Image (spheres, rainbow, N blue to C red):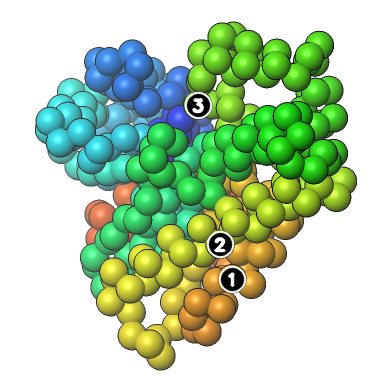
């Protein structure tokens, strides 16, 4: 039995996977993103989730052959790495596990733990790729000075476009009415109250406006469309940089996939595909195979040197939801 844990920014997902590709149990718990609430949050959430998923599968933690924990912000504070590495030990009662950043979950899920590159564009953005046993990350530098092409980045640029349109510094477009209606603004300057006062500049709240920028683009807003095109180009650049850093040869085929809600937007996805192939003609862009939490479980199996076989992987694709233990 392999345990995968995907610690996203809004929740932590848990999945117990059998070697035959069937899912024994899945559950979720609060986010393990600890920058606001302190690092003690991590073991509390992991204990809750591991207890629940094991109970659902009818096993104890000792019955887990190997576990992989993908945690947000892992590796971004050097002084916290040892604490995060140790967090699952007392809960599991053994050392058959590995901890890394949650970007690994998205990569493993999208490509079935095969060599290649995954680009993530949710609230934030980054890429992670592996080739011949070596992994490399590009991006993910936070919303203040990075995360290009992410939902936050798109939304922030959309807010900037709104302010310019409202002032008359840029031609007015559908974005004005889309945001006015969505945020129920009595006056355009109330946007400052909403974002800075009520939301306190919250990263997730701002990122949640990304669909409104997409809607404006679909209604013909040129500024919104330009933002989405630029987001796609930034995401393609993340991938191409990762390819170079991993040492792929000029004639070597590179598997690429994606994860995160931004790719649900057709304009972003299509522009990303077009720009990617302009940068390198040997990219093989594929739709994601599995969810990030299933990817975490697949990576646990890989780390245990017991990767799932072809038949098991095919069965897993046909059974996306939890099955009884």
Q: Distance between the residues labelled 1 and 2?
A: 6 Å
Taking 60 as reference, is 161 left or right? right
Q: Distance between the residues labelled 3 and 2?
A: 22 Å
Q: Position of residue 121 (x, y in %)?
A: 53, 47
Q: Do the residues labelled 3 and 2 touch (CB within 8 Å)?
A: no
Taking 272 as reference, is 251 left or right? left
Q: Given the current orientation, which residue lies at the most extreme bottom position?
A: 251
Note whether residue 182 is visible. Answer: yes
Note whether residue 212 is visible. Answer: no
| SS label for mark 1 | helix
Sequence-earlier tag: 3 or 1: 3
Q: In which quarter of the image is the N terminus?
A: top left
Sequence-earlier tag: 1 or 2: 2
Query: Disc 2 marks which residue?
Result: 233
Which disc, if any, is residue 187? none
Sequence-earlier tag: 3 or 2: 3
Name the foreground residue: 148 vs 167.
Answer: 167
Which disc, if any, is residue 275? 1
Q: Residue sitting at 33 percent across and 22 percent down? A: 34
Name the foreground residue: 165 vs 7.
Answer: 165
Q: Position of residue 128 (x, y in %)?
A: 37, 57
140 up-or-down from 226: above or below? above
178 up-or-down from 185: above or below? below
| SS label for mark 2 | helix
Q: Do the residues labelled 3 and 1 touch (CB within 8 Å)?
A: no
Which disc, if any, is residue 203? 3
| SS label for mark 3 | helix
**Mark 2, residues whose alpha carbon is within 10 Å: few (<14), some, or many (≥20)?**
many
Q: In which quarter of the image is residue 187?
A: top right
Q: How far apart are marks 3 and 1 (CA)?
A: 28 Å
88 up-or-down from 233: above or below? above
Q: Do the residues labelled 1 and 2 touch (CB within 8 Å)?
A: yes
């Amino acid at each position: 039995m392999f345990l995968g844990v995907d610690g996203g920014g809004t929740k932590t997902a848990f999945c117990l996977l059998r070697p035959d590709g069937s899912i024994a149990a899945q559950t979720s718990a609060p986010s393990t993103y600890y920058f606001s609430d302190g690092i003690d949050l991590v073991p509390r959430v992991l204990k809750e989730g591991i207890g629940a998923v094991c109970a659902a599968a009818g096993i104890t933690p000792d019955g887990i052959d190997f576990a992989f924990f993908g945690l947000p912000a892992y590796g971004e504070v050097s002084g916290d790495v040892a604490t995060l590495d140790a967090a699952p030990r007392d809960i599991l009662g053994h050392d058959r596990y590995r901890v890394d950043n949650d970007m690994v979950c998205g990569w493993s899920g999208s490509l079935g733990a095969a060599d290649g590159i995954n680009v993530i564009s949710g609230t934030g953005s980054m890429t992670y790729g592996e080739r011949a046993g070596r992994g490399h990350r590009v991006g993910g530098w936070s919303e203040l000075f990075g995360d290009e092409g992410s939902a936050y980045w798109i939304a922030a640029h959309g807010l900037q476009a709104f302010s310019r349109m409202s002032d008359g510094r840029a031609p007015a477009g559908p974005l004005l009415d889309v945001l006015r209606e969505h945020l129920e603004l009595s006056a355009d300057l109330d946007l400052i109250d909403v974002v800075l006062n009520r939301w306190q500049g919250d990263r997730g709240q701002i990122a949640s406006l990304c669909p409104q920028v997409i809607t404006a683009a679909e209604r013909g807003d040129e500024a919104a469309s330009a933002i989405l095109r630029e987001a796609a180009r930034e995401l393609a650049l993340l991938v191409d940089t990762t390819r170079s850093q991993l040492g792929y040869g000029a004639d070597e085929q590179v598997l690429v996939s994606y994860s995160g809600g931004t790719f649900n937007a057709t304009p972003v996805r299509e522009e990303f595909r077009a720009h990617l192939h302009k940068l390198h003609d040997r990219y093989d862009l594929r739709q994601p195979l599995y969810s990030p939490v299933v990817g975490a479980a697949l990576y646990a199996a890989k780390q245990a040197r017991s990767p799932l076989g072809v038949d098991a992987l095919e069965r897993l694709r046909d059974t996306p939801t939890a099955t009884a233990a």
